[in-house]
Image (cartoon, helix red, strand yellow):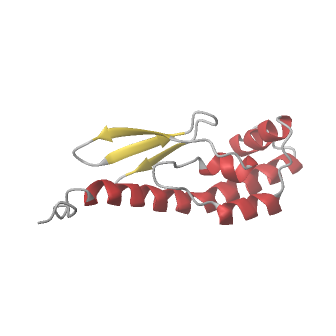
Amino acid sequence: MGPDEEEPGVSAAPAQARERWVAALMRQAPLEFARVVYGLGDRAHGRTGTAAAAAVQRAQQQGLKVTRERAEQRARAYLPVAGHEHCPRCWVLGGAKNLLQMTVVRQEEGLQTARCPHCAAEYVNAP
């Protein structure tokens, strides 16, 4: 084995874990789009007590224009980068790339969570 060659399987596990995270977060973006749509609908029909409506209201109070079209564009354009994963909820709702804080919950099982410090969204990734 040469100096530039790595032993098979040594660095593959962390790379696979990062790929799983990226794939899981990409699957989450359409769900966050649906959350925005429900929030807009709830606010339009006077149901301001729901979590989705409250998220839309917070974004609008921060001066962001929240529309179905923009949320759909952002959901389709969401592309996290391994090692710099950003929150799909913040991205779809307002276009902000807030980095997620990764935490290993159970090392032996490979269970990890990612939490957004801005919106408090939490995502779980298990093998």
Query: x and y percent of residue 59 in the render?
Result: 78, 40
Does residue 8 sit above or below 81 in this rendering? below
Q: Is residue 16 left or right of residue 42?
A: left
From where the camera sits, is residue 127 visible? no
Does residue 32 sit above or below 115 in this rendering? below
Residue at 20 percent of width and 56 percent of height: 10
Q: Is residue 68 left or right of residue 26?
A: right
From where the camera sits, is residue 19 visible? yes
Residue at 44 percent of width and 47 percent of height: 124
Query: x and y percent of residue 93 in the render?
Result: 73, 49
Query: x and y percent of residue 46 in the render?
Result: 87, 44
Which is nearer the eye, 7 or 80? 7
- Name the image quarter holding the C terminus: bottom left
- Residue 72 image-quadrant placement: bottom right
Q: Is residue 72 left or right of residue 112?
A: right
Residue at 18 percent of width and 64 percent of height: 8
- Name the image quarter holding the N terminus: bottom left
- Residue 79 image-quadrant placement: bottom right
Which residue in the rendered view is the most extreme toward the front? 3
Residue at 67 percent of width and 50 percent of height: 91
